[in-house]
Amino acid sequence: MWRQISVRLKKRVCICPYELLLYLFLSDESDTRSMYFLLLFCVFLCCFMYFCVVLCIFVLFYVFFAVVLCIFVLFYYFLLLFYVFFVLLYVFFAVVLYIFVLFYVFFAVFLCIFVLFHVFFAVVLCVFRVVLCIFAVVLCIFCVVLCIFCCCSIYFCVVLCIVCFVSFSVLFVCICVLNYCHRVATQLQLTNISY
């Protein structure tokens, strides 16, 4: 087997590093060159192993950072979905607020119209009350005038009654006097005839 390895080495055929190490340790050729070569190969092998270990560590760090980056990306997408949800919720509340504002404006306009109607009816009612007060004053004046007229009428009736009574008395007296005069005249005529 050592011969095969040495033949392959001489022919510069690619062999496994473990076979080369075995050959260097177990071969009978122990000159300085092969020792240096062995030492160099060991250093190279240690460096290569160190490089592999470092590479594995870097790969592990890369995988760790890739996993952390994936977690951060997932967290970012989760936050993005959360943000989209909040944006949709904000739009929904904005639309609801807009509808409430429209209803508020509608009710404010309706309330203004109702207040205007109330003011209009209050003005009409005040005008009606003023007209009613003027009518009541006119009616009171008319009642006072009527009372005065009634009092005057009563006074006139009393005066008329007194005048009628006095006239009746005077007429009665006149009739009585005339009757007496007529009787006296008649008696005088009869007396004159008898003479």
Image (spheres, rainbow, N blue to C red):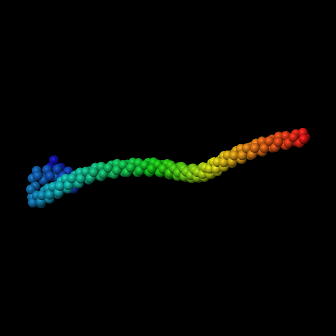
Give coordinates of residue 168: x percent, y percent.
Answer: 74, 43
Residue 183 can be seen, yes or no: yes
Give coordinates of residue 38: x percent, y percent.
Answer: 13, 56
Q: Residue furthest front?
A: 195
Residue shown at 24% from the left, 53% from the top: 61
The residue closer to the viewer here, 39 or 77, is: 77
The residue closer to the viewer here, 22 or 187, is: 187
Marks counted in the figure total 0
The residue closer to the viewer here, 167 or 41, is: 167
Residue shown at 21% from the left, 56% from the top: 12
Residue 77 can be seen, yes or no: no
Residue shown at 66% from the left, 48% from the top: 155
Question: Vertically, is 46 above or below 184?
Answer: below
The quarter of the image holding the C terminus is top right
Residue shown at 58% from the left, 51% from the top: 133
Give coordinates of residue 95: x percent, y percent.
Answer: 46, 49
Give coordinates of residue 138: x percent, y percent.
Answer: 62, 51
In the picture, measured across the screen, residue 100 lies left or right of residue 9, that is right
